[in-house]
Image (spheres, rainbow, N blue to C red):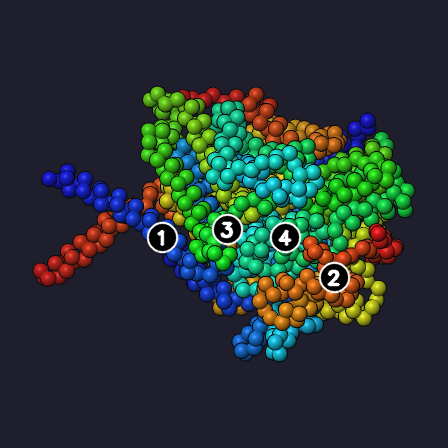
Amino acid sequence: MDYLPYLLAGVSVGGQYALIAIGYTMVYGILRLINFAHGDIFMAAGLIMIYLCTALPLAVSIPLVLLITVAIGFVIERAAYMPLREAPRMSVMISAIGVSYLIQNLALYLTGGLAKPYISIPWISDTITILGATTRRVTVITPILTILLMIALILLIKKTKIGMAMRAVSRDFDTSRLMGIRVNNVISVTFIIGSLLAAIGSVLYFTNYTAVVPTSGQMPGLKAFVAAVFGGIGSIPGAVLGAFLIGICENLIKSGGGAWTNFSDAFTFVLLIAVLLVRPTGLFAEKKIDKV
Amino acid sequence: MKRILALSLALLLTFAAFAGCSGASDNSAGTPASGGTAAAGDSGNAASGDKIIKLGVFESLSGDNGAGGKQETLGWVYANSVQPTIVIGGETYTIVLETVDNESSTDKAPSAAQSLVSRGVSAVLGSYGSAVCIASSAVFDQAGLPMLTVSATNPQVTADNDNVFRLCFLDPFQGTVLADYAYNTLGATNAYVLSKQGDDYSAGLANYFVKHFEELGGKVTDEQFPQGNTDFSSYVANAKAAGAQVFFSPVSTEAASNIIDQANAQALGIPILAGDTWDSNVITQAGKGKDIEVTIDTFYQESGTPFDVAFKEWISADPQRLADNNGDDTLAAFSVMAYDGYFTMLEAIKAADSTDSAAIQAALSGVKYDGQTGAIAFDDTGDALRNSAYIKKVNTTDGTWEFLEVATVG
Amino acid sequence: MNNIKHRRNKKILTAVNVALLLAIYVAVFVAEQVLPQTSMLFVVLKKGSIYALIAVSMNLLNGFTGLFSLGQAGFMLIGAYVYGIFTIPEEFRQSVYQYFDGGVIHFTVPVVIALVMAGAAAAIFAALIGLPVLRLKSDYLAIATLGFAEILRALFQWKIIGPVTNGSNLLRKFPNFNDFNIKGADGKVAVYLSTLIPFIVAGICILLIVLLIRSSYGRAFRAIRDDEIAAEAMGVNLFKHKQLAFVISSFFAGVGGALLAMYQMAIQANAFTSAMTYEILLIVVIGGLGSVTGSCLGSFLFIAASEWWLRGLDGGTFLGINAPGIFRAGFRKVVFAVIIMLVVLFYRKGIMGDSEFSAKRIAERFRRIFMKRKSKIEVVENE
């Protein structure tokens, strides 16, 4: 059986999940918060792009979308998460769920609940043939772009001052503050990077799957989080690897046909539970010593 | 600051509570689809002391079936604007439409149905989407309200439900027509069927298609995708791998645009077949300029009659209506069916000569009316006697529908 | 002397609490006979009582034991389906299971037994799921339980077990609340019981949970919530107690799911999404983590606001303001989401915090106000 179309689809969607997963893993690493709203920021980026493209040319819309999404991520962090910094973990998570709820309902209200067709970006949405399988050019571009961005991000974290600050804050929050690191700024930068990657991911994702609905971000967001857990929370290469794996497995299950296609979404969770039981810290996590 | 906020929140909710309590009697919510036009017509008269009769419009205005529900609502509202009054017992009553959104969700539908009941409607028009019809029929039955749906094709909608009547044909009929078309006209002996998991309509129609196609001697690969799935490339690849000669996908328009798009991107190469849900300009717009063949069966085909022209003008006159009709003025079959449904309900009210729901329900079963979509009469289960369907396909150059033939069974 | 007075006061207060509860039930019963059946009040009462039960069961797990679980929708699904499958009357089975030749189950059980079965089935699944999952820490536990709920949802829609669960199609025609109305000789309803029944069932279940919380098990749960390591050091068997909390919470979530099926009169697996769990979680947080009365109050407020009071926002006219351009479909949910965010940000403790309603506290507060006023008058008089 020819597995190429499934692998291509899997790698492509995996790359898109990876861009979202990086945002999850970074925020969790520093704040220990599952940012439920991240998937919805991804969806919002898609909708904003559609609205901008009706008024502005493409060359202006794409950078503007990135900018606006980053702004949204920043505002959400300041308004919904910063006031709850001292509150117990569950409060912040509830706040994240509340923000997710708000974004989805706003999108529902503004779009009237109808699916909006995404604009077609020339060149990347062209159909090409690879080794006998016909697909879109964006399926090939996505994994390449994802890996490039991942490398850039790792360099940022390892070589720059702000990257060192991020590593310090995720290792020990309070001590970093005592050492004079402006923790609020570090957190804001984390959210900015995460939102930027989500916006890029949304451009790639919606070029391939062209209908945008308010709930478009829910499943990809959840799967991206599973990928982050799978790879090891706090580890960026782990999240990317996990995402590709989930994307490929999902499509291989769909190829199985017949009775098993029902479970293509549920399989992601089976994978998650298996990982949590066997290796709870994920594949690449940093060793943590639980002090009693 | 916190106290002021708390106080204002509490006050807001208390006022809302009072408004809600008393709202049951005088709440004349205008239909969302019509913007300002219909609201001006129906909320003004209530104050002048005219007699009014309320009809409930129970539609899915958001969610998976939002597009279809909005187009169907256009039909109800247009019919109301053409005929806003009715004579009962010698007096002229104004017909007021009360609209509620059931969000295409079977767990929100019963509460939405209850809120419609609480507004004192005499009968219910709608809904689009078999699952929400089935889910809410019990609520309306308990309240003694008759329900007329014009596009829900699943047999369970009227089976054992005495208060539900249906204007369109049923899935067993539709499945047979489509299977015949696939086997005889398209000459396919190997079919790939993709339905949506968790959707009564999709699973039901797929079931009937598979049954009849196999009876004719064909081979079927039957698969389902989970709700919310946007990546159909693997299913397209499955169809190619199975050597299918026709791709049958009875799903909602939301998934449809993705399927068409990805089928094109991966050069599926075989004809795509679908049911009545795909009769919408969402499909024609998705298919425009693409190298695919999409054929559907439906309840109506517009052909430039005075009715068609007038309806299209009405839609184009208001930007909100145009947006609800997905941007252009192509008539969706459900809009026209809704128009017929409205007049069918009026016939029943005239025959019952009262605003009492039980009388209207009794009169509905005996209604005979000639509508835009054909002659209307109901059988014992509450289904309309319909035995023909219009087959049409997408003209990929213009992005319009091209009429092929009328198919009948029996 | 003081001791006897203290004991007498305590007895009076318990009597007052019980009397208040009974008054609520009587009020519900009377309201149902007097007000028209079509009023939205009954929707709020029925759905509110069902969600109150589920919220209390979730509070038991999240608020009292500190286990952050997001799998409630999955257990509700099990409960609803078990109830539906075993109570559909034989005459309707052929048409409900029309794609599966009438299904495989051809017997029915009485409603009460079906409710218990629903809870038991959910509890059994919980016991199985709990074995691997309860070892995980809070955030991972949340995602793992969420995952299990999604897997259950996909499982119940599987075509292969369609003859039992009806696959993607709705289950309907099972007994519902209106079947409990007592009909007179002329066939018309003489006594309405359809709202009292969910109140009674939910009330009994919540009472059982409260009894559990007040027992030594409840104290162990709270010890685990406050400090797991200290609790273990004190001799509390962590796993056994977590398992107990999980199973009991799921039992009542299952019963709640069955009640929800009775309310909706038609159920479909697809509708039990994680969004439903989030709603319950929001109710618990609004009411106050760790407060049973808070969850009950929060539930009624939540349902009333989302289903009833704010519906005008969808229709063009609200509080006399007519603005169909803004007030169209979907606005209600946006306003609701904003209110939730405000509550979460500014009133973290919820309505009741972690304390229960008590007539004593209200009496105290009145007395204090009274005393203050009295002393103020004395001060003025003395001057």
Q: Residue at x 33, y 29 (%)?
A: C216
**Which residue is at the front of the view, C60 or C44?**
C44
Quarter the C terminus of chain C occupies:
bottom left
Q: Is residue B109 visible?
A: yes
Label 4: which residue? B161
Mark 2 Cα shell of 10 Å, populated few (<14), some (14-19), many (≥20): some
Specify the label residue C178 is tagged with.
Answer: 3
Label 1: which residue? C26
Contact flag, marks 2 and 4 (Cβ < 8 Å)? no
**Which residue is at the front of the view, B139 or C315?**
B139
**Chain for disc number 2:** B
Q: Quadrant of residue A54?
A: bottom right
Label 2: which residue? B377
SS for callout 2: strand
Q: Amino acid at mark 4?
A: Asn
Q: Residue at x 44, y 47 (%)?
A: C197
Rounded to the nearest whole Å, what is the CA distance between mark 2 and mark 4? 18 Å
Q: Position of residue C334 (x, y in %)?
A: 54, 54
Q: Position of residue C188 (x, y in %)?
A: 50, 58
Q: Position of residue B402 (x, y in %)?
A: 86, 56
Rounded to the nearest whole Å, what is the CA distance between mark 3 and mark 4? 16 Å
Q: Amino acid at mark 1?
A: Val
**Chain for disc number 4:** B
Mark 3 Cα shell of 10 Å, populated few (<14), some (14-19), many (≥20): some
Quick check: C27 above or below A29?
below
Q: Position of residue C276 (x, y in %)?
A: 54, 43
